[in-house]
Amino acid sequence: MIGNAYSEQGFLIISEAPEVSINFDYVTEQTLKAHQKVLTELIERDRNYPSVIMWSVANEATTNREDSIPYFKSLSELVRSMDSTRPVIMVTCKAENDLVMDFFDVVRVNLYPGWYHLPGQVSKAQDDLRETLEKMYAKFKKPIFITEFGANTIPGRHALPGERWS
């Protein structure tokens, strides 16, 4: 099993449900049931691997709408009922308006300063990153884990001033 190899090599794993960019304009009761099923299977598969350090319920879902509250509350409760020993997390991409982070143990965020925000302005992006993280901590009072960070590149492409292409 791949989990054994990771554990033997000392890797630390966040085991994440393959739920990306959940849009509540299209969420139904069936969506929630399918999400619960995927999480249940994920935890049953991975819970005995010591390399798994956190459970992640989703990546960059819509978390700034009222209908996201019962949805993510139920998912966090499901995960905790199956394993109370590991932190439960999810990625927010709208931290300033997030309504569900109270249900999670760690604020997980994907940030691309100098790329999607302040493109090509590295010194401004550094200050902006610091300010963003300080605001997040002030709002949530939880550890913050940046799980995606950086910029995209195309080998051999150079431009001054820098050009964003994605």
Image (spheres, grey):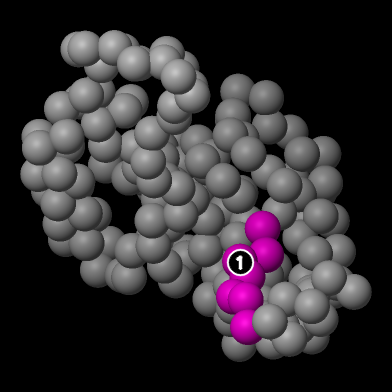
| Residue 89 in the figure: left or right of residue 133 | right
| Residue 129 in the figure: left or right of residue 11 | left
Q: Residue type at mark 1: give it.
A: Ile
Q: Position of residue 1 (x, y in %)?
A: 90, 74
Q: Position of residue 88 (x, y in %)?
A: 55, 69
Q: Position of residue 40 (x, y in %)?
A: 81, 65
The answer to whether residue 16 shows anywhere in this view is yes
**Location of mark 1 (residue):** 14
Q: Residue at x 81, y 81 (%)?
A: 4
Q: Residue at x 44, y 71 (%)?
A: 105
Indicate the secondary structure of the residue bearing disc 1.
strand
Name, please, the residue furthest toward the front: 156
Is residue 126 placed above or below 42 in the rendered structure?
above
Q: Position of residue 139 (x, y in %)?
A: 21, 57
Query: How busy is the neighbourhood of tag 1: few (under 14 within 10 Å), some, or many (20 plus)?
Result: some
Is residue 125 placed above or below 143 in the rendered structure?
above
Q: Residue at x 83, y 70 (%)?
A: 2
Q: Residue at x 10, y 37 (%)?
A: 123
The answer to whether residue 97 shows anywhere in this view is no
Q: Is residue 14 magenta?
A: yes
| Residue 34 in the figure: left or right of residue 28 | right
Name, please, the residue furthest toward the right: 1
| Residue 109 in the figure: left or right of residue 39 | left
Residue 137 vs residue 165, the one in the foreground: 165
Q: Which residues are magenta?
A: 10-16
Residue 37 vs residue 17, the one in the foreground: 17
